[in-house]
Image (cartoon, helix red, strand yellow):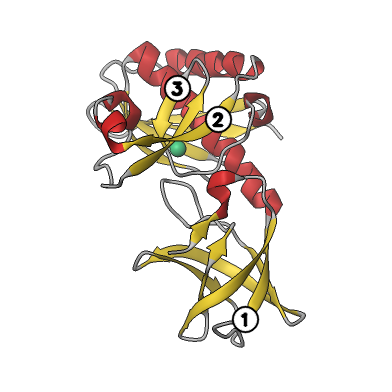
Amino acid sequence: MTELLYLEDSYLREFEAIIIEVNNDKYVVLDKTAFYFHSGGQPNDTGKIICNNVEYNVVYVAKVNGNVSHEVDKEGLKVGDKIKGVINWERRYKLMRMHTAAHVLNAIFFNELGAIITGNQKDLEKSRMDFNLENYNIDEIKKKIEKANEEIKKDLKVKSYYLSKDEVMKNPSLHKLAKNIEDRDVYRILEIEGLDTQCDGGTHVKSLKEVGEIIFIKAENKGKNNRRVYFGLRD
Ligand SMILES: [Zn+2]
């Protein structure tokens, strides 16, 4: 199993690792990685793997058969090679800000409107959030986004830690966003102090201020009770 370095330090931009598997000459598994694999509505990182002074672009990262597979753009990497990984930080940092912003919005929509969040997709320019809400009013939605921005200005602390399966199972609010919660011994928790606590394996900023300002882009009706909001971040 690849050690996921970003779970402990989401600000880690470079790391060293050993190649433990190469499939079809371009899918590389490492003993540890700071590359985020596509999951939980957060897109994968991109970046570079450097080995013997040759740079390989990492174009996609996914979890395949329990391992984190880094797809590179050329052949040449071998099992046992010592590599340096470099994350495309501009992309990742934007996705971290987006992901934390989504948690703030999810919490406010749930706490204040009783909206059940049914889906999330984070992206660089705009992210979307799907939710169940009978009465739909665009001004209401804009007001909640303003409220989210007030919370962000308070610069609440964002922290992660682990809880046992027992603790997670007896507190359903910790996994209200999960469609089917993965069975494991310990769960990583992401807490925005005083606002939201969730099981989460994503990368986040350390303090809310870093999110900046959430911008409303548009809202759509996706059928009975089903709403979709698109939002972005001011640069
Ligand atoms: Zn999340």
Mark 3 Cα-neighbour bin, 10 Å: few <14, some 14–19, many ≥20: some
Residues packed near mark 2 inside 10 Å, few (<14), some (14 to 19) or many (20 plus): some
Quadrant (top left, top right, bottom left, bottom right) of the N terminus:
bottom left
Tag 1 or tag 3, which sits nearer the N-term? Answer: 1
- 231 or 26: nearer the viewer: 26
Q: Which residue matches tag 2?
A: 159
Q: From this viewpoint, which residue is outermost toward the right?
A: 53
Of the residues shown, which amino acid type is indicated by label 2?
A: Lys
Mark in the foreground, 3 or 2? 2
Labelled disc at residue 144 = none
Q: Quadrant of residue 45?
A: bottom right
The label shown at residue 81 is 1
Of discs 3 and 1, which sits in the foreground? 1
Tell me the distance, in whole angstroms, between the alpha carbons under discs 3 and 1: 42 Å
Q: Tell me the crowding category of disc 1: few under 14, some 14 to 19, or many 20 or more residues within 10 angstroms, Cα based.
A: some
- The quadrant where residue 224 appears: top left
Image quadrant of ligand 1 equals: top left
Give x and y (percent) for residue 229: 44, 31
Q: Residue at x 28, y 47 (%)?
A: 182
Q: Which residue is mark 3?
A: 196
Q: Name the residue: 57% across, 68% down.
A: 59
Residue type at the position of mark 1 = Asp
Which callout, 1 or 2, points at the residue further toward the start of the chain?
1
Q: Position of residue 65 (x, y in %)?
A: 34, 68
Q: Is residue 92 above or below residue 208?
A: below
Residue 131 position by quadrant: top left
Where in the figure is residue 160, as x and y percent of width and height? 51, 34
Q: CA distance from mark 1 to mark 2?
A: 34 Å
